[in-house]
Amino acid sequence: MQWDATYQKSTKGIEVSVQSSFLDDRSEPEDNLYVWAYKVKIKNNSVMRVTLRQRSWHITDAYGNTEVVRGEGVVGEQPVLDPGESFEYTSGTPLPTPSGIMVGTYDMEVEDGGWIVVDIPAFSLDSPHESSPLN
């Protein structure tokens, strides 16, 4: 699998890196089905222990239609990250268009009982089925 560019963002010492990859073998352009995998790495560069409790994604297709996906944890887990630790996972999303964009947040509980909202950087979903305009 070939991964696209890495997008990174840091919030209060929690660094989130994301890469996406178009899945040609799972997509069916003739049926307006385009599928991507995305790989996320969360690294705790802070001095506090954090637990990822919830996620919120905004997935927008090429027509500007946005789907909001919220849920507990990621890939069935609520990882606990001590300072210096990281957690990686891979997931996926379908779209009815050959391109789109994703952005989101993680709600993390801090060891002292407080909460922080960690930004997930916006990243593009691009397929070889999207024609780029020539300028």
Image (tube, rainbow, N blue to C red):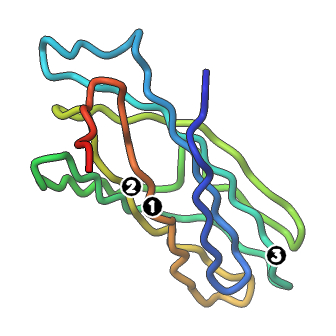
Q: Residue 71: which disc?
A: 2
Q: Position of residue 91 (x, y in %)?
A: 50, 36
Pointer 3 residue: 45
Name the element at disc 3.
loop
Local crowd size for mark 3, using a 10 Å CA cut-off: few (<14), some (14–19), many (≥20): some
Left or right, residue 122 beside residue 81 = left
Local crowd size for mark 1, using a 10 Å CA cut-off: few (<14), some (14–19), many (≥20): many
The mark that comes first in sequence, 3 or 1, is: 3
The mark that comes first in sequence, 2 or 3, is: 3
- Three-letter code for the amino acid on which mark 1 is drawn: Arg
Q: Position of residue 28 (x, y in %)?
A: 24, 12
Alpha carbon distance from label 3 to label 1: 19 Å
Of badges 3 and 1, nearer the viewer stands: 3
- Three-letter code for the amino acid on which mark 2 is drawn: Gly
Left or right, residue 102 beside residue 46 = left
Left or right, residue 45 beside residue 51 = right
- Name the image quarter holding residue 44: bottom right
Q: Nearer the viewer, residue 31 or 114?
A: 31
Of badges 2 and 3, nearer the viewer stands: 3
Q: Establish if 86 lies above or below 126.
A: below
Identity of the residue drawn at 41% across and 64% down = 104
Total number of numbered discs in the rendering: 3
